[in-house]
Every structure is written in structure tokens, then in C-alpha cells.
Image (spheres, grey):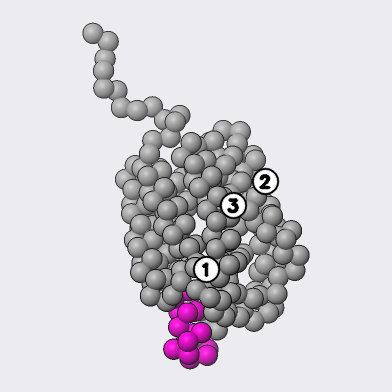
Amino acid sequence: MCWSAQADAVAGGLVAVTGVACVVRARRADHPERLPLAALPLVLGVHQLIEALVWLGTDGGLPDGLAGAARTAWAVVALPLLPVLVPAAVWCAAVGPRRRVLAALTLLGAAVAVPLAVAVGSHPVTAAVHGHTLGYAVGIPYPALLLAGYLLATVGSLLVSGDRLLRRLGLVTGAGAVVCALLWHLAFVSTWCALAALASLLLLHWAGHRPADEPGPVTDRAR
């Protein structure tokens, strides 16, 4: 989320382009198992472009039907999709015994996603300007419990991935989420788009990085 339709459109476009670069880099590095996570910035970029439409809808710049569809699409990505996509993508990229823990976190994400999907499908998604931010309302049951499961599935999967770069991404994402949530609560400014951009750059670096257990090229032979 950004602080205006224009900011969301620009940031979303840049993050989406970074996502395409992540996918290309993972393919060139011959790491197909990394493609689901490498595609995450592309999802985040499209999500921000959708929110640009939501902003226009709050200003009366879109027909009601299109504005409602944009709000629903935003909620589908933010709520039921991400808590499944992130741990599942980390599971695909992981190796060794940590995959069992990541499989459990993926199941947790799926369990969180079910009531979130039901809420999105059963209630109209509303959005209202809240200072320099957008406030969404969906009618989610047990929000504190679902938020805890959401963060455990997404940030937790990065932290237990066993990959140094993904652990760093998990720390940045967790700390950034706290800061962004505080600024949003104060209605000061929405900085989620900045966090998405930073996460995308970290994933761009990770997508082409050689896994720790993969041997590098032989550059020196016994003489």
C-alpha cells in the first residue's frame, strides 16, 4: 500500500519489473525450484497496481462495479493468497530436513487462508481513505488469532528456511511490518510499498545466488 494512486502505480510497476527480473535470474541460474518465490515480487507489484485502482474508486474516478472488483481482488491477494504462497514457495526452494517444518507452516498458512477466503467471499470489501492511507474492512473473524497465524506462516517460513539471505529477508520483513503497521495506525503515511520494494530487491539478489550446498565452479586444480 502506498499513500496515493500515483505512488501505488509507480511503485507497483517498479516492483513488478523487479519480479520479472527475479524470474529471469532464477531461470538463468538454473534453479527452477526457486521460481515460485522469485515470482513473489511480481505478485506484490500487481497487488499495488490493483490498489491504485482502489484509490481511484475512493475518489469516484471508477464505476462502482470496477471499484468493487478492485477492492475484492486486493483482498484476495492480501488475505488468502499470501499466507499460502509464501511458505509454499519457500518450501519449494528449501532442501534437507527443514522442508518438514516448512510443510507444516504451509499447512498453517492454508488453515489461515480458509477463513480469510470465506470472509472475502461472504462480505463486501470496503475501503476508505484514512489520512494518507487506505483502511480496508472485510469482516474477518478472530482477527488477532488469524494475524498471528498469518505472520508465523509467512515471516516464520523465511526465518526457518535455512538460507542466510532468506533469513535476512524474514528479519527485514518482520521489522518492516511492525514499522509500517505503526505508521498506518497513526494515519501518517502508508509505507508498505517501500517494504515490498525492499523485499523485492533482496529476492532479486537471492534469485541468482548459488545455494550454500551447491558446489561452485572449479577455478583451481592441484598443480
Magenta residue span: 50-65
Q: CA distance from mark 1 to mark 3?
A: 26 Å
Q: Is residue 103 visible?
A: yes
Q: Which residue is mark 1?
A: 188
**Label placed on residue 104:** 2
Label 2 or label 3, whichever comes before in sequence order: 2
The residue drawn where x is 46% and y is 69% is: 2
Q: Is residue 73 visible?
A: no
* Position in image of residue 44 (x %, y %): 46, 62
Q: Which residue is mark 3?
A: 154
Q: Secondary structure at mark 2?
A: helix
Kindly check if marks 1 and 2 are in contact, taking CB atoms under 8 A apart as contact.
no
Q: Nearer the viewer, residue 222 or 122?
A: 122
Label 1 or label 3, whichever comes before in sequence order: 3
Q: Amino acid at mark 2?
A: Ala
Q: Point out the residue furthest to the left here.
A: 223
Q: Is residue 18 magenta?
A: no
Left or right: 31 in relation to 144: left
Q: Quadrant of residue 118?
A: bottom right
* Position in image of residue 219 (x %, y %): 26, 22
Left or right: 157 in relation to 201: right
Left or right: 56 in relation to 116: left
Q: Nearer the viewer, mark 1 or mark 3?
A: 1
Instruction: From this view, report whether residue 202 is shown above or below residue 162.
Output: below
* Position in image of residue 34 (x %, y %): 45, 46
